[in-house]
Every structure is written in structure tokens, then in C-alpha cells.
Image (cartoon, rainbow, N blue to C red):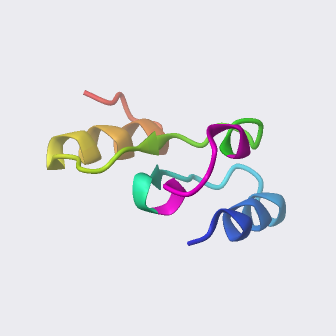
Amino acid sequence: MPLKRILKLNRLRPGVKVLLTSGYVANLDEGQVIGHGEMPVLNKPYRRDELARSLRLVLGGEGR
């Protein structure tokens, strides 16, 4: 999903949970993402355990 749509979704539903992956932000400069709230980025390639930990953090779990 393009960042523009994510930002629109964030305006329509504040507090929506988002986890960006490097495939979605590869062409963006870091400053374009920073300043749009807390949007964690998981860089590719990643392992299943890294994905699971990131999802737990985003969804409010402990992240272990």
C-alpha cells in the first residue's frame, strides 16, 4: 500500500496499526516517513521471528 494511502487511512482512523516493510518505502527518503506519527519499518530481508516480533510490538504485545 503506498504511503499516501496509509497517511489517508491514518487520518480517517487515528490509531490504526501500521508496519511498513522496506518494499513499500524503498524509494522514499527517511524524512518522508518521519514526522507522520510512529510508523515502524521492517527492512527486507527479514526472518519470520523478526516479523513476529515486529507485529507483536505494533499490535501492543511484548515483542519477545
Image location (x, y in percent) of residue 34: 69, 36
- Residue at image position (75%, 60%) is 7
**Residue drawn at point x = 25 percent, y = 45 percent:** 52
Where, by quadrant of the figure, is residue 36 drawn? top right
* x and y percentages locating residue 59 in the rendered image: 46, 45
Nearer to me, 11 or 32 = 32
Magenta range: 24-32
Residue drawn 65% across and 55% down? 16
Q: Nearer the viewer, residue 6 or 16?
A: 6
In the displayed structure image, the side of residue 56 where residue 3 appears, left or right:
right
Q: Nearer the viewer, residue 20 or 55?
A: 20
Quadrant location, the C terminus:
top left
Q: Was residue 3 drawn as part of the magenta stretch in this picture?
A: no
> In the image, 29: left or right of 7?
left
Horizontally, is 59 left or right of 5 in the view? left
Residue 38 against residue 10 in the figure, above or below? above
Residue found at x 70% / y 49%? 15
In x, y percent, where is residue 9? 73, 66
- Left or right: 7 in relation to 11: left
Q: Residue at the right extreme?
A: 11
Against 56, is 16 above or below? below
| Quarter of the figure that contains the N terminus | bottom right
* Place of residue 10 in the rendered image (x, y in percent of width and height, measured from the top left): 75, 58
Q: How many marks?
A: 0
